[in-house]
Amino acid sequence: MNKARAFWLILTLLFMTPAWAFQSRVVTIPSAAMHKSLEATVVLPDQYARGKADDRFPVVYLLHGSGGDYTDWTSNSQIGKLADRYHVILVMPDGGHESWYIDSPVDPHSRYETYVGTEVVGYVDAHFRTIATRQARAITGLSMGGFGALHIALDRPDEFGAAGSISGAVDPRGCEDEPGIDQVFGDPMRHADFWNNEAIVENARSFGNAHIALTIDCGVNDSLVQSNRTLHERLVELGVPHDYAERPGGHTWKYWANAVQYQVLFFAGTFKRNGATTAASAAA
């Protein structure tokens, strides 16, 4: 291939590449709580580069599931396109393979709630042009990450104004056979109180007190659907506002890649109602 042909091929590929692809980057975030650094994927909307230098953006935090990492969402879905569509920053931190995003009572080195809920948020606000208020922050995740998102939001209502769960393990007491879960929660018998206190289904009333915009969904063929129905029913009984949906599908990326589109749409609407938007998204 001669140089001229190679040049035009490269130029063509550049123009064929979606704009948001250039805005995806991996950052390394230090954790004082765990004495190590972890990576995270950050996707910036195209408007971040094209807009005014002082434009600031709301942030959606997306948590991966058990056995996953910070690359899961971008590897298995078209999540990056949502950053452009809704003018939001997407942040996908690494939550460890089986951390459950809690500060473990039995493993002092596993403090992923503090890491994600405090250290990641602090890093993102310090290094990117965010709207650094609860009204402009949302957090969601799939499976273990769904539990983690709701758990972190409940513990930090001053940090997150909106939260969601996709196929969330909202009652970890039904996941006792999950490999490694007892290493962070502790033995289900000896630490029964902790397991009970951490179950999202036992904390439905707290969502009303926290005034968090809430969206939950699960596939009808998912083994976790019954615990999600229980959470939904308790929220209804308590009069806690929330969106709830069941759609065809199971515990698969096909379901999650579709469901996250509705969740980010929900968050974008919440940001707009809160007045926490850029000029571009407010005009959309």
Image (tube, rainbow, N blue to C red):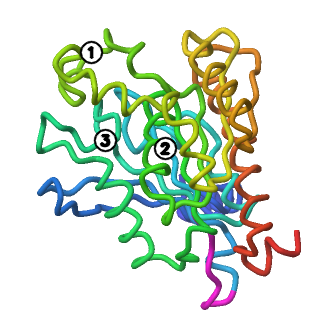
Q: Is residue 268 left or right of residue 159?
A: right
Q: Which mark is residue 179?
A: 1
- Name the secondary structure under disc 1: loop
Q: Going 47% across and 34% down the picture, which residue do you hit?
A: 147
Earlier-in-chain disc, 2 versus 3: 3
Q: Residue 207 in the image: state x and y as whole percent.
A: 58, 46
Whether residue 7 is visible? no
213 vs 223, nearest the viewer: 213
Q: Residue 201 in the image: state x and y as whole percent.
A: 52, 28
Q: Going 48% across and 76% down the picture, which residue do you hit?
A: 128
Q: Which mark is residue 102?
A: 3
Earlier-in-chain disc, 1 versus 3: 3
Query: Which residue bears the numbered disc 2?
Result: 149
What secondary structure is the magenta-colored segment mainly?
loop
Q: Is residue 135 left or right of residue 177?
A: right
Q: Going 56% across and 57% down the picture, which residue do you hit?
A: 90
Query: Does 79 lie within the magenta span?
Result: no
The C terminus lies in quadrant: bottom right
